Image (tube, rainbow, N blue to C red):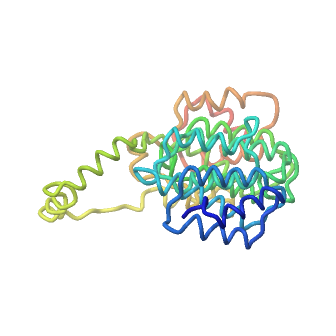
Amino acid sequence: MGISAAEPHDVLSSIIKRKTVTLEEVLILRRQVWPDGKLSKSEMEMLFRMHRAIEHGCAEWDDFLVESLTAYLVDQAHPEGYVNEADAGWFEQNILHQGKVRGAAELEALVSILERAVHAPHRLEMLALETVRDAIADGNKNIVSNLTLEKDVISDPEVSLLRRLIYTNSGSRSDAISLDEATLIYDLNRGVDSRMKCPAWTILFVNVISNYLLDQNGYVTPTRDRLREIDSWLNRPNSGVIGFASAVSLRNLPETRSAGEFADIKSAFGNLSPLDDAYSLRDSERSCGAARVDSLEARWLIDDLCRDEPLTLNERALFVFLKAGGYAVDPALNTLIARAQ
């Protein structure tokens, strides 16, 4: 049973000796690893051992490794979907070499885990974002699986990868953008070749930075301990789901929803709308004062932008968006907004 059985043990020895893996061998390993739908730590470490030995792999092997890691770290977590610190540390030890993510399969596994997890340590997301940033800066075609990647040039595949990471469900503040995320995206924009136009990158840049400036909603994903408390409450026979449903049935008050005043905002950039499906302001945020750029947020921009160099296309797009949306901004930004016109 499992990957330690005789047949896959022979496969393991063969793969390590030949430093290559075939589709047929991947199918054998799948049959042995997944018989009960569970993976053990020893099995995962054996898969890592094979992966490090392989010099000539195949797409099926990479898919198998990504699926196995995601199932082990996310689906088998308790509570399900919560990646704890210990498992995150073990995962990092196996995918890093001299502090860097080893290759495209390891990066894809990292992205997959972040997408599937309810919550994961924030450093995993930053590790993935930093890996993509460094790959763009170095023109590393292998780490992002883009054979057309050029040094300091960002294109649609990299934007798609960044978007997957930034809008994962596992972030500590739901769909709100953190300062370190915004800073990384802002620095990346400064580093890429501004002569290369990528509309998807402009849209993502405006989304991310404006989200950080305007969408400080304070939401924090519940901790694992808090989720255990909730699970315990849900399973109590006289309260939990049954008690809650009974209480709701007695009240049954109608809910009203509004499309919100932001629904009518039109893009200032023609087809380059900075308001895409991945980012929408909640209706209540403007009324509670979230949809504004305060002095601290303004200072974050001013400290870098008050210089002699002209604003980049994306920076101009950001300020045009803020002005077109009618958002309340700190007066200190008025000079920069005027420069953007």
Front residue of 306/148: it is: 148
Q: Quadrant of the N terminus?
A: bottom right
The quadrant in which residue 182 appears is top right
Task: Answer left or right for 31 relative to 261.
Answer: right
Q: Is residue 341 visible?
A: no
Front residue of 74/294: it is: 74
The quadrant in which residue 65 appears is bottom right
Front residue of 72/15: it is: 15
Rendered position, 292 above or below 16 = above
Q: Is residue 123 visible?
A: yes
Rendered position, 63 above or below 126 = below
At which x and y percent is residue 221? 42, 44
Q: Quadrant of the C terminus?
A: top right
Task: Answer left or right for 198 relative to 232.
Answer: right
At which x and y percent is residue 127? 66, 41
Name the residue rendered at 52%, 32% in the picture: 294
Count of all numbered marks drawn on residues in the image = 0
At which x and y percent is residue 259? 41, 62
Name the residue rendered at 42%, 43% in the picture: 219
Residue at the front extreme?
6
Front residue of 241/79: it is: 79
At which x and y percent is residue 55? 84, 56
Name the residue rendered at 16%, 54% in the picture: 239
